[in-house]
Image (cartoon, helix red, strand yellow):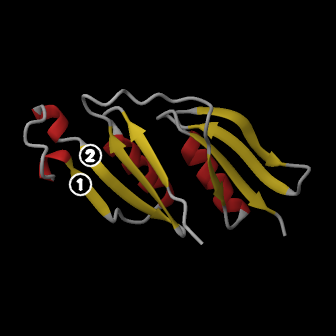
Amino acid sequence: MATVNTYLNFNGNTEEAFNFYKSVFGGEFTVVQRYKDSPGCEGMQIGDQEKLMHIALPIGGNILMGTDITDPMPASTFGTGISLSVDAESEEEAKRLFDSLSAGGTVTMALEKTFWNALFGMATDKFGIQWMVNYDYK
C-alpha cells in the first residue's frame, strides 16, 4: 500500500516551525536543504536563498515535510480545510503532545474523554496548522 505523508508550505518560517515540531515529537531531521544549495537557484534573491527548499522529520512511520514559499510562488494560506491527526500511544503522551502543540496557539476543543472511548482534543498551533490529538482507550 502507498504511504501518505504530510507536506506543509510556510511563508518563510519553515525552519522555526520544524524546530518547534522537533521539540514536540523528538527525532532528527533526515533532510535539511536550503535553496542556496540547490542547482538552478543561484539567481534567487539572497534572502530567499537562505530559506528551506525541503525539510523532513520522521514521526512514527510517517514523515512530516515542509518548504518555504518563495517568489514567484503564491503565498501559503491557512484555513480549516485540513487537520493533522496524531494517535498517541498513551494518555500521558496525548496530554504532552496536546499541551505542546497548543502552546502559543488556540485550543479548538479541549483534550477530554469522549463518548467514543478516547481522549481527544483539537488545536491550531502558533503557525496556523490544525492538529487533532487522539488516544483510544483499550
Which amino acid type is marked by label 1? Answer: Gln
Q: For the residues marked 2 and 1, what is the alpha-carbon distance in whole angstroms?
A: 6 Å
Residue 95 coordinates in the image, percent (x, y): 67, 53
Residue sticking out furthest to the bottom: 1
Number of other residues with Cα within 10 Å of mark 1, as a class: few under 14, some 14 to 19, many 20 or more: some
Residue ID at (41%, 53%): 65
Number of other residues with Cα within 10 Å of mark 2, as a class: few under 14, some 14 to 19, many 20 or more: many
Position of the N terminus, as image quadrant, is bottom right
Mark 2 highlights which residue? 52
Residue 20 coordinates in the image, percent (x, y): 42, 47
Badge 2 element: strand
**Mark nearer the N terminus (2 vs 1):** 1
Residue 136 is left or right of residue 103, and the answer is right
Residue 131 coordinates in the image, percent (x, y): 61, 44
Badge 1 element: strand
Instruction: Establish if 97 lies above or below 136.
Output: above
Residue ID at (68%, 61%): 92
Residue ID at (66%, 34%): 107
Mark 1 highlights which residue? 33
Residue ID at (66%, 62%): 88
Residue 24 is left or right of residue 98, and the answer is left
Position of the C terminus, as image quadrant, is bottom right
Pointer 2 and pointer 1: residues touching (CB < 8 Å)? yes
Residue 72 coordinates in the image, percent (x, y): 25, 28
Judge by depth and name the residue closer to the eye, 135 or 34: 34
